[in-house]
Image: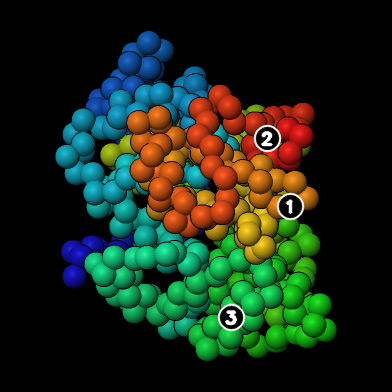
Amino acid sequence: MQKRHITPKLRMLRAEAAAPFAQRKAIAKERLIGVLSHAKATVPYYHDLFTSLNFDPECLRKDMRYFEDIPFLTKDILREQGRRLISSTHADAIVREQKTGSSTGLAATIYYDQEGLDWTAAQNIMVLGWGGKSRYHREAHLSTLFAAMSPEAASVEAKKCFVLHRKNIYTEGFGNEAQLRLLKDLQNAKAVFVQGHPSSMFALARYLEKQSKTAPGLFEVFVSTGELLTAEQRVLIEKIFSARVSNRYGACEFGVMAQELTTGPVDELLVSDSLVWPETIDSKASEPTELVFTNLRNPVMPLIRYCMGDVGKLAERNNGWWITHLAGRTHDAVNINGSSYPTHYVQDILDRCGPIDDFQILVANQVAKELRLVVNQEQWEQTQQAVKKQFPTLPLRRIDPEDLVFVGIRGKFSYIIRENT
């Protein structure tokens, strides 16, 4: 009904993934050279950059080390350059604008055409299989409960869930009543496979543990997505539900970049080498360092050597690239008007309230005292009204990007800041 072409691409991806890694890497290299040539010819930012560097993408056929001559792309550059990172030959084909998360810097916009979106959708289905989901398995997808959804959006979502054999389960926080509703919804869903934020499933596991209860058989596989999965979360979720936890790593800039295999090593993720070319910011470092990716399937906005802000180790083995020691975004919980909410819930709500570039919550003893929003002055009044409908008792304050607070010796960003900060 939406004129999308996902299943044919899924077949192609599966056939490619079944090939030996040496063959897949050669294909990825050709795809990478094509992306660089396309970017040089049609993307203003890369045309100017490659010209200033006298960089010819064809030189990679002689030596891949030439790739390191290209400077890293950061989110700051992405925000600064904006539409100069869009291909001139694909600008009219844009069908989606997606806002990045803001835990590693201010939010930025990523653009896709239909072809690029369909590739990421096909890749998502394939890596769900890596995580343990067959197409016939019933899936439950944990999502944030929003105040309202238009009839058109609700209709599209219902059709998508039908096609994917998926049931959306909406979470509302970490309180006891919310946990009881989540448990009941999961029981009714009868899902084999559950996907969602690990903090949501961990909260349910802790609730059951406090009740001296377990729930074996509620589902078979939990795929952790959207935020950092900790060892503590993995252990308790597997213990309470007698299920396998499978970690994944994705971002709106690329789609799903890596997935832990259900039958593979624990806490090691296989890279989607058909979708991205992976690196780290320091390939010689013995400790985990920042992960870097180049997209291979989005001609509208080719991101080349893009720094994710997340850290990990990248290992090249005879069956693929693997990410280990992954550490990335993590979300805290905050008490708002007597209820405990994960900050990803707050983030999801704010994404629907207007052009909010970022936010932080001032807390004291885990209780929210003030919600600080990065919003342009001219858009503040209407944005403030929308946010007030969601959090009517929480004081709001407009701030500028430079007013955001970074903490720790490495200046890490956190959605939660303490009252004395």
Is residue 316 in view? no
Residue at 68% in and 35% down: 412
Residue at 40% in and 80% down: 165
Is 75 situated above or below 392? above
Q: By what rule are the colours in the image chosen?
A: rainbow
Structural distance between the alpha carbons of marks 1 and 3: 24 Å
x%, y% of residue 349?
A: 47, 55
Q: Which residue is mark 3?
A: 181
- Residues packed near mark 2 inside 10 Å, few (<14), some (14 to 19) or many (20 plus): some
Q: Which residue is mark 1?
A: 366
Q: Residue 178 has which mark?
A: none
Structural distance between the alpha carbons of marks 3 and 2: 34 Å
Q: Nearer the viewer, mark 1 or mark 3?
A: 1
The residue type indicated by label 3 comes to: Arg
| Left or right: residue 369 compared with residue 68 | right
Q: Earlier in the sequence, mark 1 or mark 3?
A: 3
| Left or right: residue 331 compared with residue 399 | right
Q: Residue 412 has which mark?
A: 2
Q: How many marks?
A: 3
Q: Nearer the viewer, residue 212 or 318?
A: 212
CB atoms at circles 1 and 3 under 8 Å apart?
A: no
Residue at 44% in and 56% down: 389
Q: Nearer the viewer, residue 178 or 16?
A: 178
x%, y% of residue 307?
A: 54, 33
Is 361 situated above or below 176? above
